[in-house]
Image: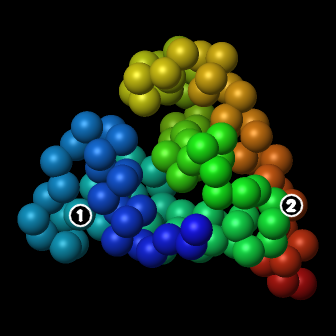
């Protein structure tokens, strides 16, 4: 199922147990400080993964897990700290980060232009 940036924004704050700021500018700034990019980019990546049949939208491939990758790419911190931030164990964190990184790398031929 395709998603929209507003859903991504709301989910991004919920996952980190953060209250969404009232100001639009503050919301965008805080979201970017958490994930290193804007909700529109994460939305685009998710939708491209679905449209290019790289993942199926199922219980196994939850949108929430895509946020792990963006956190990893922004912070590049130790797995323990990242896993604690998301309330999961290190093995689960590692599994889904590398799963989605692999899938995202397959988008490069469709997304990156010469």
Residue 64 lies left or right of residue 33; in this view the side is right
Q: Give the residue furthest to the bottom.
A: 114
Give x and y (percent) for residue 20.
18, 55
At a point 49% along the width and 46% down the height, the residue shown is: 64
In the image, 24 versus 86, the foreground residue is 86
Q: Is residue 69 visible?
A: no
Give the residue at the far left of this rendering.
22
Residue at (89%, 84%) from the top-left corner? 114
Q: Residues within 10 Å of mark 2 (few under 14, many from 20)?
A: some
Label 1: which secondary element: helix
Q: Quadrant of residue 45?
A: bottom right
Contact between labelled residues 2 and 1, with CB atoms less than 8 Å apart:
no
Q: Which mark is residue 71?
A: none
Location of residue 29 in the rendering, given as x and y in whole percent from the top left corner: 29, 62
Residue 72: x and y, percent?
Answer: 58, 38
Q: Which of disc 2 and disc 1 is earlier in sequence?
A: 1
Would you say 78 lies left or right of 14 here? right
Task: Give me the disc on residue 106.
Answer: 2
On the rendered structure, is 87 left or right of 27? right
> Quadrant of the image for the N terminus?
bottom right
**Which percent across, then down, holds residue 112?**
81, 77
Q: CA distance from mark 1 to mark 2?
A: 30 Å
In the displayed structure, 96 sits above or below 113; it is above
SS class of the residue under badge 2? loop
Instruction: Characterize the local packing of mark 1: few (<14), some (14-19) or many (20 or more) Cα atoms within 10 angstroms.
Output: some
> Which residue lies under the disc numbered 1?
27
Q: Residue at x 23, y 63 (%)?
A: 27
The residue nearer to you, when weighing 27 against 6, is 6
Q: How many marks?
A: 2
Q: Is residue 55 visible?
A: yes
Residue that appears at 56% across and 72% down? 2
Q: Is residue 43 above or below residue 103?
A: below
């Amino acid at each position: 199922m395709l998603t929209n940036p507003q859903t991504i924004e709301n989910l991004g704050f919920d996952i980190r147990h953060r209250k969404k700021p009232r100001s639009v500018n503050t919301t965008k700034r805080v979201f970017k400080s958490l994930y290193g990019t804007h909700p529109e980019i994460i939305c685009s990546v998710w939708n491209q993964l679905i449209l290019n049949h790289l993942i199926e939208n199922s219980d196994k491939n939850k949108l929430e897990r895509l946020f792990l990758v963006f956190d990893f790419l922004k912070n590049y911190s130790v797995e323990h700290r990242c896993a604690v931030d998301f309330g999961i164990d290190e093995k689960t964190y590692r599994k889904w980060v590398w799963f989605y990184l692999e899938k995202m790398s397959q988008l490069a031929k469709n997304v990156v232009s010469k």
